[in-house]
Amino acid sequence: MPHCRHRLELTGVVQGVGFRPFVFNLAKEYKLNGWVCNHTAGVTIEVEGDANLIEAFEHDLSNRSPPLAVIDSFIARRIECIGACEFVILPSSKSGDLSSTPVPPDIATCQDCLNELNDVNNRRFGYPFLNCINCGPRFTIIRDLPYDRAATTMCAFPMCVECEAEYHDPGNRRFHAQANACSKCGPAAFLDVENGSAAIQEAKSVIESGGILAVKGIGGFHLACDATNNLAVENLRERKNRFEQPFAVMARDIAVIRQIAEVSAHEENLLSSRQRPIVLLKKQPNSSVANQVAPRNGYIGVMLPYSPLHHLLLDTKPLVMTSANPSGEPIVRGNLESRQRLSGLADAFLMHNRDIEVVCDDSVVRTFENAEMPLRRSRGYAPLPIRLTDSNLSVLAVGADLKSTFCILKDHFAYLSQHIGDMGSLETIEAFERALKHMLGLFRVDPTKVVCDLHPGYNSARWATEFARRHGIELIKVQHHHAHVASLLAEQQLAPETPTIGVAFDGTGYGTDGAIWGGEVLIVKGNEFERFAHLRYSPLPGGDTCVRTPARTCLSYLRTAGIDWLPSLPCVAHYAPIELRVLGRQLDRDLNCVPTSSMGRLFDAVAALLGVRQQVTYEGQAAIELEALCDNQSTTRTYPAVIIPGAPAILDPEPLLRSIVSDLQAGVPRDQIAQGFHQAVATWILAACILARKQTTLNLVALTGGVMQNLVLLRLTLRLLRQAEFDVRVHRIVPPNDGGLSLGQARLGNWQ
Ligand code: ZN
Ligand code: ZN
Ligand code: FE
């Protein structure tokens, strides 16, 4: 039997996921000696022993690795034997080159831990912070790499004798589990003041009596209340100043969720995945959940508990669990901070003394064609990298101003940040800077370029300009819809230069001509694009006022199309005659009117036209309610989807709107009209793609932008495009909305 020694270098998600104990046990199994060591670049292993056994060991390393581990590269080479006589885990070293070591995301409580939590005979019975090598917080407690307890917010809790013994026992599930804790040595929960174990019981009674509870979780505070109590939910809405935007609900188990919503097999998998995202599910008509939780919405966002504290807090009743943030501000992180920022919002505070190093909101996903479509990629996913087709410079992209994320490129990977939020407030910009500093530090990145949106009014663009100036690095500006398309190409593992027909439909994006774009069909060739077709410009009188008032947008559309403002139309009836005269004059004189080709605004206009919604309180509301109207609608009216050829070609909404108005007057049911409108938009996409294919021979279509979250539209569009044999791509890894934008920006910025 030849005796030899191998040195193995592994990179990927190999820290904080039980990789070293796994290696240790595997080496024992194959009777190999040597060592394993974490360092900033990954994991290094040296094994010595029988050559055949080494081969088997190497094979098993990737095939039997722990569930959370992702091995990206594996290099083995033969080195000289030194006659080792045991296998050891060496202390982590800060050395190693500065290549990427992915940090694991926060992982929902595993079944083994859950069993212990509920076992009266276990020493961790009812302990709200138990975790093990397979579960628990990671990203939100890590301060630095390598991932060791001392470099996390757990450093404040020295392990007790029993925990320490588990930690050093290679046969134990908590062997080298950095966040290992028990009630003797670990963090504790308390209600309002440090009052010990009664905290959770008392917190439950606050909720039971209709109160609002602030709960400190993994990535920040939630506000929780009884989701079946209408008054409590309304009270929460009033205090939070959030009148209609849906709240997410947390339910104890799948059985409870089934009483709230329809759950497919794929959705059940997503709900119980270790990421534990909020999943948008079709509402059950007779659920006990208060109507105010997700008013006028066909869907409800639901999640399962993901920390032991949640498991202990939940009974049979589902709870509203919404991010604790005063409107427009980031989620609350610290105990003291919660007192200040949530005073007046919560009746009681269920807190704990494990610090959250960096905030991370819940993720939101939905399923489409039995696969995941992310709407917000955050807790459970961030900061796992997205693998790219080729190597990149160190680029930082700062995203858009709403649903903001940033993205860092390094080598073959894109690290997309957690959800940051609305960059309109100073607090969010501070949260952005904190999250950025955290990630740049963890991944040891020094950006050589910074990329932002073309929009001169974006706070993110201003921030990037200042950052570039301060660091003396290049600033690159990228057009919004171009970045949307590039983002989809990147996540789909397509090379950035892949020529594509990009259909980017959203609410708002600054165009190269200074207009507001958003109904764009682009021919994208790497860092260049041609605007092949777009929705006809219509003026937005008062710009942002229109975004909040679909009625206003609708009137503008009608005027542009030469359709009379009939008093019987709900959008006309929304205004007093004097207001109509003023608005008419403003449009006639083109005063303070911004031209827009936004598809989002056309959805708003049609929603207003049908009397669905004249005013919105959150982004996308009118379109969401219009989509909900199409439910179970099988009969489809056909409306003209006219394209006027030219460079660019123009999608002309005038004949479409004219037909809708005459249907309305003829008393055609609104749900049929809504469905017909979605069909018309899908037909437009098909027609534009066919035109584009004729001119360019391209067959690849990328569907992106916030409008593509609309499942009714997506389903109709895909059916048409596939019938015409296009190769169609939709978002599966990053959101189609602006939350995925920074990935595309980074990719384009890398190239320029
Ligand atoms: Zn566990
Ligand atoms: Zn302990
Ligand atoms: Fe967008």
Image: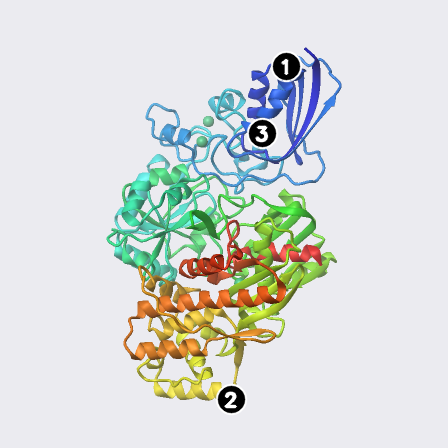
Q: Classify the position of the N terminus by image quarter.
A: top right
**Where residue 35 is drawn, which disc sits there?**
none
Q: Classify the position of the C terminus by image quarter.
A: bottom right
Q: Is residue 454 visible?
A: no
Residue 274 found in image quarter: top left
Q: Position of residue 294 (x, y in %)?
A: 33, 58
Mark 2 → mark 3, Cα distance in angstroms: 68 Å
Circle nearer the viewer, 3 or 1: 3
Label 1 sits on residue: 86
Q: Mark 3–mark 1 contact, CB under 8 Å? A: no
- What amino acid type is highlighted by mark number 1? Glu
| Ligand 1 within 8 Å of the CB at mark 3 | no
SS class, disc 1: loop
SS class, disc 3: helix
Q: Position of residue 382 (x, y in %)?
A: 53, 46
Label 2 sits on residue: 589
SS class, disc 2: helix
Q: Earlier in the sequence, mark 1 or mark 2?
A: 1
Mark 1 → mark 2, Cα distance in angstroms: 86 Å
Label 3 sits on residue: 62
Judge left or right: residue 95 versus residue 364: right
Q: Position of residue 649 (x, y in %)?
A: 56, 74
Circle nearer the viewer, 2 or 3: 3
